[in-house]
Image (spheres, rainbow, N blue to C red):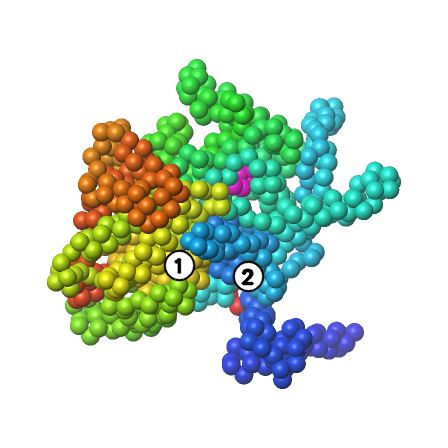
Amino acid sequence: GFGERKAKAERMFSLMDGFLKNDPFSLQKDILHHVEYTVARSRFNFDDYEAYQALSHSVRDRLIERWHDTHTYFKRTKPKRLYFLSLEFLMGDAALGNGGLARFSACQMDSLATLDYPAWGYGLRYEYGLFRQIIVDGFQHEQPDYWLNFGNPWEIERIHVTYEVKFYGTVEDVDRNGEKHEVWIPGETVEAVAYDNPIPGYGTRNTINLRLWAAKPSNHFDLEAYNTGDYINSIVNRQRTESISNVLYPDDRSHQGKEMRLKQQYFFVSASLQDIIRRFKEAHNNFDELPEKVALHLNDTHPSLSIAEIMRILVDEEQLDWNKAWNIVCKIFSFTTHTVVAEGLEKIPTDLLGSLLPRHLQILYKINSNFMEELKKRIGLDYNRLSRMSIVEEGAVKSIRMANLSIICSHTVNGVSKLHSDTLKMRTFKDFYELWPEKFQYTTNGVTQRRWIVVSNPSLCALLSKWLGTEAWIRNADLLTGLRDHVDNTGFRHEWKMVKRLNKMRLAEYIETMSGVKVSLDAMFDVQVKRIHEYKRQLLNIFGIIHRYDCLKNMDKNDRTKVVPRVCIIGGKAAPGYEIAKKIIKLCHAVAEKINNDADIGDLLKLVFIPDYNVSVAEMVIPGADLSQHLSTAGHEASGTGSMKFLMNGCLLLATADGSTVEIIEEIGSDNLFLFGAKVQEVAELREKGGALKVPLQFARVLRMVRDGYFGDKDYFKSLCDTVEVGNDFYLLGSDFGSYLEAQAAADKAFVEPEKWTKMSILSAAGSGRFSSDRTIREYAERTWKIDPCQCPF
Ligand code: 4GP
């Protein structure tokens, strides 16, 4: 009866007694609870790591509550959702990505959650993240990063959220209502298991999800193998399928034609799309609604097999007519490209694709032939242009051009800075731009101030809130412009200097523990940290340091007192197969060895290479930097996000007019940074000069020193020197060297006037608001994805 039902309901509610509480006592209680019952140690006897695990579980419980509330609310209100597809996320402890692209994905997730957007991230749960770099005798060695060794308390394993992902096999014709249709009969099945990583927003209950897939063998047995008695081997083979999500490819920008990489991409795409389509079908029953409810974002071309896969699902499985499906699909994808270099554009050999995914290759051919027909109608029989724009590249190795595919199917093609987008339009994707100018947009990158100030620089965080009179800048970085009002206040400037000094102290201690080098806090801390790449020109930096050393050695003792002491800090990983990058690391160590052991030079110049540069190291290095260097040859850095982190932390930039630096100049004014080098429009002309290019004597002298073995290992460095020899110097180190030295001199000159320097530092941070990923995400949401905030009201 009614009374009984009422009593039952009351019992239920009394059991669900509200949310977990956040006061210190409740948290302490929970931590002890987890020590005892989750970590299974005695609450009277546990170590720091176990305490950390128990704490993580206590926080995780609270995140799970918020996660549930957020997703219940999304389910109920059915907003249009964004699915952010990325093969790489560089979160921090979990190094599931290489460099800029991956860290940018992590910043975007933080902003999506904070701004209450109904978004999901999808990625791969690599068991081995980016390798750890160790330095032996100045050489980089790679060590595997098995980051799951001690478990990962932040993830939620969803053993029931699994999908089958299929590979290989054949395509067969079937009869469907008297019509002939192609269907895929796959040959191998792997299971994808979901691991959810809650992403909490700041100052909101909204907590979104980063769902990462892991591979495990499916329970579908190969009957044949079992019947022939090959029991052991078939189990061993099954184990091999697990390896799909094992390891992250450590090359940024160039992934070409490796079967395992292709398997990873499809595994990721297939599991994600099955999940997305299932969720869509639970709430909607007509695929016409897909573009109103789903935005799929391709973070670079890595997930672009999604296009073929969703066509396969709609046409082969959901039995939609091809043209109808294609019209839907073209309305849901957007695409961001993160590179300008040609080798960064992914190509997949058709042989490889055809054997792994035969039906997808057919679909890609069909997309292409339809596109070619349409194109002929629009541009006529311009065969050169047609072949450039084709998805299929003919040639020695016939392959699929993933960028062309992504552009053709996406409604928006995004560059990551204004300059990058201009380069895409004028050069890389010129043919497509002429066809569809309206598709090409740019959304300048950004970084999250929550991690890059609040977490990594707590003293600056407190100072900002004090002088801005509010903490609101943590959610609205535009408020940082308010610092401009205080720049003439000496009290404020004094506190600003103290914060920098504190962070330099922290960094100096780290340097001493890592490298044994003692550095002076009065020296200028001059930093270049990022992946090692020829175009990023770490070699220019090292040559500048050699030049400085050479000048010091040849200088009168009296004149030396006028020199600004420097601590030059370089850090970054080289892709394991990238020989020239590895030689740059070795040269850095060889030069450091010489300089740091020269008693005659003392504190005037030090060079340290910080090993294993990663997110945690960045959190220490960036707040402690006075000057940071961004030296890419103009036109080669798509955006650059490191510069934005330094800017936020009041570090001055020494940079070329490349990527987002052009926009940073607009924001802080060219007086507040040290600009040098050829402009993007000059680069081609300089290159054409080849052997006739003028190079300053100082450059020739430094190059000679390295060639002659002044830093040892002369044979080893020969090929490195060759890359910058006149006539061969593609990245124009020689021709930019003169203006580089001038910019360095200007930095020295500013540094000896501490008040001037501090003002420049404050104005840098004050202008950094535009480079918050919150601005980036809002622009994407409003212009590209057309999604609205959806704030969970609980
Ligand atoms: C990087 C770009 O090199 C960098 O300029 C940009 O800021 C970053 O992406 C985020 O957009 N590219 C990669 C890559 O990391 O793997 O191509």
Magenta segment: does it hold 765? Answer: no
The region drawn magenta spans 301-306
Question: Residue 608 falls in which quadrant of the image?
Answer: bottom left
Q: How many angstroms separate mark 1 from mark 2 (CA)? A: 32 Å
Relative image position of residue 526 (x, y in whole percent): 29, 58
Disc nearest the viewer among 1 and 2? 1
Q: Which residue is mark 1?
A: 610
Is 486 on the left or on the right of 342, as rendered? left
Q: Residues within 10 Å of mark 2 (few under 14, many from 20)?
A: many
Q: Which residue is mark 2?
A: 198
Residue drawn at (45%, 42%) of the image: 578
Relative image position of residue 264 (x, y in whole percent): 60, 43
Is 752 on the left or on the right of 28, as rendered? left
Identify the secondary structure beneath mark 2. strand
Q: Amino acid at mark 2?
A: Pro
Residue drawn at (33%, 50%) of the image: 711
Q: Amino acid at mark 1?
A: Ile
Q: Total marks drawn?
A: 2
Residue 571 position (above or below residue 472)? above
Relative image position of residue 529 (x, y in whole percent): 37, 54
Residue drawn at (64%, 34%) of the image: 357
Q: Nearer the viewer, residue 499 or 768?
A: 499
Residue drawn at (67%, 75%) of the image: 40
Q: Are marks 1 and 2 in contact (CB under 8 Å)?
A: no
Q: Is residue 49 visible?
A: yes
Q: Nearer the viewer, residue 406 or 713?
A: 713
Picture disc at residue 298 = none
